[in-house]
Image: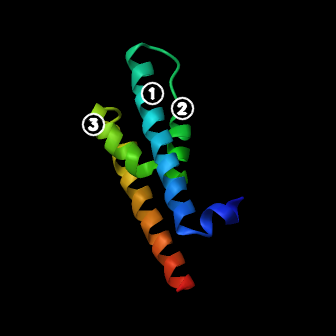
Amino acid sequence: MFELIFSHPTGIVLYLGVINLIAAAVTVYDKKQARTHGRRVPEKNLFTLAILGGSPAMLVTMHIIRHKTQHKRFMLGLPLIILAQLIIASLVYQSTH
């Protein structure tokens, strides 16, 4: 399955689209839970979604809905994850072309 998704550019774009939608939705859900004192999404789950590729949408969503913007862990961590992902993607691309 992994090879099927990541062996073609369309699969990569589809994967990134889906994981970013999920990351944005989970971020909005966590904000709603914070407002209503409901059960929150653990930070490790938010970071896992970011590492899996949802970091761009999560960071943008957090700024739009003003969620966790005072948490340096997220406001520094998410851009660093994005930077690391870009570096890795660049290295993978260069090694295959």
Image x and y of residue 89, in percent: 49, 70
Up-down relation of residue 40 to residue 79 (above or below): above
Residue bearing the label numbered 1: 30
- Please tell me whether mark 3 sits on a helix, a strand or a loop: helix
Identity, as a three-letter code, of the amino acid under mark 3? Ile
Q: Which mark is residue 79?
A: none
Q: Which mark is residue 64?
A: 3
Image x and y of residue 34, in percent: 41, 20
Q: Residue furthest right?
A: 1
Up-down relation of residue 29 to residue 47 (above or below): above
Q: Is residue 64 left or right of residue 23?
A: left
Query: Front-most of 72 and 17?
Result: 17
Q: Residue at x 69, y 66 (%)?
A: 3
- First of labels 1, 3 by sequence position: 1
Q: Which mark is residue 42?
A: 2
The 10 Å Cα crowd at callout 1, few under 14, some 14 to 19, many 20 or more, is many
Image x and y of residue 46, in percent: 50, 40
Q: Residue at x 56, y 83 (%)?
A: 96
- First of labels 3, 2 by sequence position: 2
Q: Nearer the viewer, mark 3 or mark 2?
A: 3
- First of labels 1, 2 by sequence position: 1
Q: Residue at x 61, y 65 (%)?
A: 6
Q: Residue at x 46, y 75 (%)?
A: 90
Up-down relation of residue 88 to residue 62 (above or below): below
Identity, as a three-letter code, of the amino acid under mark 1? Asp
Q: Are marks 3 and 2 in contact (CB under 8 Å)?
A: no
